[in-house]
């Protein structure tokens, strides 16, 4: 009878050793940063210094953004089950969807799709501002005509500019990692108002998706990077909940202000 085989390029263990990505894990410990390791695990290659810098910047940008729904969900779950920290972290991560965190993946996929479908119109140089702006107009017009939104446009708090966006753009340029996704995203930021008739900021989750796509993170992994970053933020939220709890106040505020209203008659 043939023994089953389960091939992997990641980690394997014997009684005396652990290897990761073909390397002795004891050699990696203390010499490889966690962000670099995450990149290596997802792409099966080590990032360049520039790619590593951009990834670290993205992880910082997405770690925490205050009392967002993900943070509140984690704190309230911890209030209910303080004996299960993993449940509170999981509750926060489960909220990573199309409105929070998931925009990172949605934006990267949107930009990639535009670049692929309009490959012939993609400018050959980063400094062809007019060419990028025209491609940006095409992208926004197509989204509007399809009755959909451009992922990464708009923010519930930052109405004029998300401070993370220009900073990550600058870091990518300094690191030599300013690629077509970021260039197109920047163009959308410049031209969308003339198409839509109103100003919307390029948000941090969107610019992170563009940056991750430019440094070679697979599109299907973009939301995972956002969740990886937010895990650190949720641990911080839960550590603060242990030190200075607000979960009970949130619960009581909602409970004490809940008012009964009769159900609407479906015939009306």
Image (spheres, grey):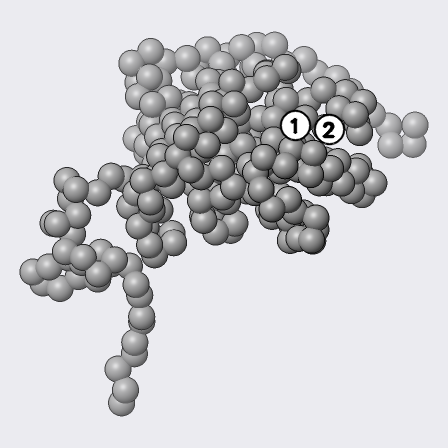
* Residue 171 position (above or below residue 211): above
Q: Position of residue 39 (x, y in %)?
A: 35, 46
| Point 43% across, 17% down: residue | 247
Q: Nearer the viewer, residue 261 or 58?
A: 58
Label 2 sits on a secondary structure element that is helix
Q: Which mark is residue 70?
A: none
Q: Which residue is mark 2?
A: 192
Q: Which residue is mark 1?
A: 189
Q: Position of residue 13 (x, y in %)?
A: 17, 61
What is the spatial separation of the Cα atoms under label 2 and label 1, in whole angstroms?
6 Å
How dense is the environment of label 2, judged by Cα within 10 Å: few (below 14), some, or many (20 and up)? Answer: many
Asked whether the beta carbons under mark 2 and mark 1 sit within 8 Å of each other, the answer is: yes
Can the viewer see residue 223? no
| Point 65% across, 47% down: residue | 122
Can the viewer see residue 203? yes
Most extreme residue toward the right is: 268
Image quadrant occupied by the C terminus: top right
Residue 142 occupies quadrant: top right
Most extreme residue toward the left is: 16
């Amino acid at each position: 009878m043939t023994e089953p085989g389960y091939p992997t390029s990641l980690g394997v263990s014997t009684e005396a050793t652990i290897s990761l990505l073909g390397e002795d894990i004891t050699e990696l410990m203390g010499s490889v940063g966690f962000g670099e390791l995450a990149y290596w695990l997802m792409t099966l290659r080590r990032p360049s210094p520039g790619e590593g810098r951009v990834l670290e910047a993205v992880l910082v940008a997405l770690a925490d953004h205050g009392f967002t729904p993900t943070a509140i969900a984690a704190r309230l779950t911890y209030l209910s089950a303080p004996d299960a920290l993993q449940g509170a972290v999981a509750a926060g991560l489960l909220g990573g969807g199309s409105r929070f965190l998931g925009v990172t993946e949605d934006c990267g996929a949107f930009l990639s799709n535009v670049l692929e479908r309009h490959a012939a119109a993609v400018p050959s140089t980063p400094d062809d501002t007019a060419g990028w702006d025209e491609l940006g107009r095409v992208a926004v017009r197509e989204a509007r005509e399809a009755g959909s939104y451009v992922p990464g446009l708009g923010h519930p708090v930052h109405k004029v500019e998300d401070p993370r966006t220009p900073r990550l753009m600058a870091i990518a340029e300094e690191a030599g990692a300013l690629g077509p996704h970021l260039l197109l995203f920047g163009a959308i930021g410049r031209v969308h108002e003339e198409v839509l008739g109103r100003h919307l900021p390029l948000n941090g989750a969107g610019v992170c998706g563009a940056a991750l796509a430019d440094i070679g993170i697979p599109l299907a992994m973009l939301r995972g990077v956002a969740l990886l970053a937010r895990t650190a933020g949720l641990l911080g939220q839960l550590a603060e909940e242990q030190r200075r709890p607000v979960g009970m106040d949130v619960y009581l505020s909602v409970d004490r202000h809940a008012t009964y209203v009769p159900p609407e008659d479906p015939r009306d």
